[in-house]
Amino acid sequence: MSKKQLWFDVEELETIEQCLERMKQQGYMPVGRREEPIFHIVNGEPTVLRQKIQFKGLKVEE
């Protein structure tokens, strides 16, 4: 039995469109999105390294 909801991460070398296509291929449709910054320390100061983007997928019932 597969999960009805699943979070999909946009991988570091993947576009948002590629992530959405991967979700579709696995039978999920996007119903939510969240972003959070990933920080690293430069000269003792926190600096944004990149954004972590996730999509919440809902299993498509067929």
Image (cartoon, rainbow, N blue to C red):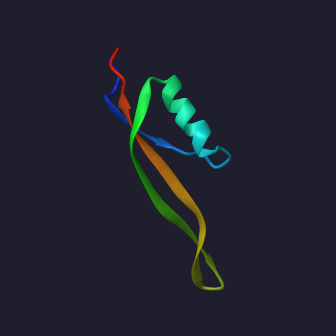
Direction bottom: furthest residue:
44
Quadrant where the image shows the C terminus: top left
Nearest the eye: 13 or 41: 13
Where is residue 46 drawn, in percent x and y?
56, 79
Q: Is residue 58 above or below residue 42?
A: above
Question: Where the N terminus falls, by quadrant?
Answer: top left
Q: Position of residue 13 (x, y in %)?
A: 68, 46
Q: Position of residue 8 (x, y in %)?
A: 47, 40
Counting labels gives: 0
Residue that appears at 42% across and 32% down: 29
User: Does residue 62 lie above or below 17 as drawn?
Assistant: above
Q: Residue at x 42, y 49 (%)?
A: 33
Residue 5 located left or right of residue 50: left
Furthest residue in direction top, as rendered: 62
The correct choice, above or below, for 17 with respect to 26 in the image is below
How far from the left and from the top, in percent, is residue 3? 33, 27
Residue at left offset 47%, top offset 62% = 36
Q: Residue at 51% across / 65% down in the picture?
A: 37
Residue 44 falls in image quadrant: bottom right
Q: Residue furthest right?
A: 13
In this image, 61 relative to 20: left or right? left
